[in-house]
Image (cartoon, rainbow, N blue to C red):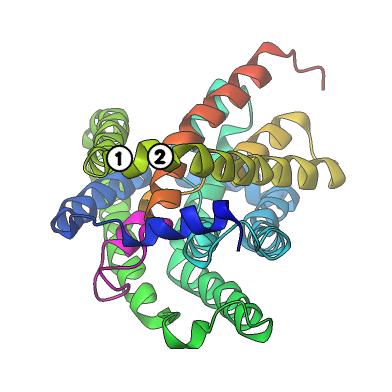
């Protein structure tokens, strides 16, 4: 194998403090609660009255992005070691990130479509996330074994039911509580929605930075490789959303929403799953952790950049 592959593979030995997992659980639950506070039934009416855009967006997020991710890691398997590749598959299997709603609004896109797509992908994440991870992870595992790259049967497991249980509990319960708050305590929901969104995001980024700093030497040594991988993977996600929207000939505001929705993944959920020892082993997954954590930082930068470009362009439609 080439030196890049070997260097990235050495990330798997990185030691991560798993005691932070409980804190991340709480942070993600708060984020999901904040997402649900912004969901209003009236937002869905117009979107689902003309469902073409949301169906195209979900097609891009649930099918196209994981499939293209798998294709990329197979093509570049000489440079991408298994744990880094599995991290990419995990991120591609996650639902949309809640910050995409703000970015879509800033980009003068269809905010109702963005919120609806985030809500649908999040509500169905207990099925879609473990399902996609199991399907594409198993295909990748078979690819590795078939081509005698590594004997993935000896160490790589695809924990569908454990992922399902974790996602269901940590996304489903906060969403239900948030919807109940919006329904019966609308003033409280309005007061909490925006502050919770920004506080939780800042805290999550701080947690990621702490994780990186605890492995400072490895981070500095390999960030150039992780940066390149995440940069192109995220660009692929943004391009996937934009291309599907263009091919589907949806209105410009919808196109902006779908570009951002498919490009912004809830990598916080992926990081939470990785910190759960009931799902993943506590050692040997450093490549997955670095990819997933850096995604959580980078997609904010890329999303705001794309949103700023969109905002600067006049909508003529």
> Which residue is found at the position 64% from the left and 56% from the top?
58
Residue reaching furthest left?
19
Residue 101 falls inside the magenta stretch: no
Measured from the top left, where is residue 135 in percent x and y? 59, 77
Say what secondary structure mark 2 lies in: helix
Q: Between 164 and 187, which is closer to the camera in this rendering?
A: 164
Q: Is the magenta stretch mostly helix, strand or loop?
A: loop
Disc 1 target residue: 217
Secondary structure, mark 1, is helix
Q: Picture coordinates of residue 181 (x, y %)?
A: 25, 47
Tell me the tag on residue 122.
none
| Residue designated by label 2 | 221
Residue that appears at 69% across and 66% down? 74
Against 99, residue 215 (above or below) is below
1 and 2 marks in contact (CB < 8 Å)? yes
Nearer to the camera, 248 or 277: 277
Q: Give the range drawn in magenta.
A: 271-288
């Amino acid at each position: 194998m080439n030196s890049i592959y070997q260097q990235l593979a050495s990330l798997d030995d990185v030691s991560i403090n798993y005691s932070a997992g409980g804190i991340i659980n709480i942070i993600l639950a708060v984020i999901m609660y904040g997402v649900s506070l912004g969901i209003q039934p009236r937002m869905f009416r117009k979107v689902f009255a003309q469902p073409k855009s949301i169906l195209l967006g979900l097609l891009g997020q649930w099918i196209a992005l994981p499939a293209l991710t798998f294709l990329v890691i197979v093509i570049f398997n000489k440079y991408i070691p298994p744990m880094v590749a599995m991290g990419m598959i995990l991120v591609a299997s996650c639902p949309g990130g809640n910050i995409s709603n703000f970015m879509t609004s800033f980009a003068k896109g269809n905010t109702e479509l963005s919120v609806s797509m985030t809500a649908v992908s999040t509500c169905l994440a207990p099925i879609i996330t473990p399902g996609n991870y199991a399907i594409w992870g198993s295909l990748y595992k078979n690819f590795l074994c078939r081509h005698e790259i590594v004997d993935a049967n000896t160490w790589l497991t695809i924990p569908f039911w454990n992922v399902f249980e974790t996602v269901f509990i940590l996304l489903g319960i906060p969403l239900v509580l948030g919807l109940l708050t919006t329904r019966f305590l609308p003033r409280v929901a309005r007061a909490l929605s925006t502050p919770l969104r920004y506080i939780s995001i800042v805290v999550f980024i701080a947690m990621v930075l702490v994780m990186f700093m605890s492995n400072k030497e490895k981070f500095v040594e390999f960030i150039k490789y992780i940066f390149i991988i995440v940069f192109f993977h995220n660009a692929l996600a943004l391009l996937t959303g934009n291309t599907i929207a263009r091919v589907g000939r949806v209105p410009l505001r919808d196109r902006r929403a779908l570009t951002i929705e498919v490009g912004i993944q809830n990598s916080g959920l992926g990081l939470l799953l990785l910190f759960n020892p009931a799902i993943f082993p506590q050692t040997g997954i450093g490549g997955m952790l670095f990819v997933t954590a850096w995604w959580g930082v980078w997609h904010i930068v890329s999303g705001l950049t794309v949103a700023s470009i969109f905002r600067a362009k006049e909508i003529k439609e």
